Amino acid sequence: MNRLYSERHIPVLLREVVENLVWKPDGVYVDCTVGEGGHTQAVAERILETGGRVIGIDVDSEVLQIAERNLEAYPNVQLFKFSYVELPVLLNILQVHEIDGLLVDLGVSTYQLKAEGRGFSFNQDEPLDMRMNLENELTAYHVVNTYPEEKLADIIYNYGEENFARRIARFIVQNRPLHTTKELVEVIRKALPYKEIHNRKRHFATKTFQAIRIEVNKELENVSKFLSFAPDLLSLNGRLAIISFHSLEDRLVKHAYRDDPRLEPIGDFIAPEPEEIAENRRARSAKLRVARRV
Ligand SMILES: C[S@@+](CC[C@H](N)C(=O)[O-])C[C@H]1O[C@@H](n2cnc3c(N)ncnc32)[C@H](O)[C@@H]1O
């Protein structure tokens, strides 16, 4: 892995995750989205002396190499390149039959945003990629340059909650082919009315980039699939902890916890304290929801 990167990912709601997830000192825990390993490390540390272990997975092989280095000192951690959608397959291979806690930290890692060339960020000029799993065929380039206007508009509207989705989709189609993130930002700029560019709290391209990223990585489909089988992997009282960063994901989690008879939500969602948000802007939209297997 030779990409330049300089900023370590700060795990969100770290104390809250450990407090709510780790209930059995010698339990088996799975971090389904290891990233750079911040949460994995804190969980592994907590159960290191008591015979507990953590299985960590991620689809991003580059990020996993960083996690491997960060977690070298933890003999109770095993890492695998795997999608959480395929978790039952991995557990079968490992002959692990029950999990005491499952953690999913959705969203993008700082490495993916900041390392050169991954194409997630509207602040850098890079090829349109946005794949978390670099072995997948579908890239942002493919979505932007080959999807019909209508489909593109629906994605930007549904996954980005962008009110100007139809205009943005039309401008994208009129200006194709687009090769880089910067070209995409410029087309979004042309499509949006002046006041949308200057008055929005977040960068004007945020919503469109989020939508394309969700489509490329099938993020909502994956969360839905995971929620359908995750309760069956848990031991009685086993915990399911999910951190989401936007309302679309959060809604899926909230409804599953409410409607799934295998689960009992523990309290309402947990949001970061103002001090955490002051230190880590990425935390501002985070919501942690925890449920118990009944
Ligand atoms: C917000 S980061 C996790 C950060 C991590 N908790 C930490 O503290 O360093 C989300 C991670 O989920 C991974 N990811 C996304 N979709 C996945 C999937 N289907 N299966 C496994 N990992 C996935 C991404 O590659 C990314 O590294």
Image (tube, rainbow, N blue to C red):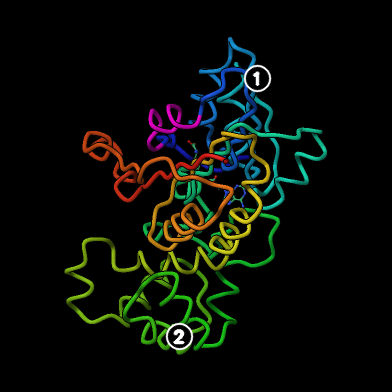
Instruction: Check disc 1 and give the amino acid type.
Output: Asn
Q: Nearer the viewer, residue 239 or 95?
A: 239
Residue 26 located left or right of residue 122: right
Residue 175: give its label: 2
Check disc 2 and report its element: helix, strand or loop: loop
User: What secondary structure is the stretch in magenta mostly built from?
Assistant: helix
Residue 148 located left or right of residue 254: right
Q: Residues within 10 Å of mark 2 (few under 14, many from 20)?
A: few
Give me the residue at 74% from left, 46% from top: 88
Q: Which segment did they paint magenta? A: 12-21
Image quadrant of ligand 1 equals: top right
Disc 2 and disc 1: Cα gap in Å? Answer: 52 Å
Q: Is residue 237 magenta?
A: no
Residue 144: give its label: none
Marks counted in the figure total 2
Residue 76: give its label: 1
Quadrant location of residue 32? top right
Give me the residue at 41% from left, 57% from top: 124
Give me the residue at 40% from left, 53% from top: 245
Residue 103 in the image: x percent, y percent? 54, 39
Instruction: Check disc 2 and give the amino acid type.
Output: Asn
Does 116 sit above or below residue 17? Answer: below
Residue 104 located left or right of residue 235: left
Residue 156 in the image: x percent, y percent? 43, 75
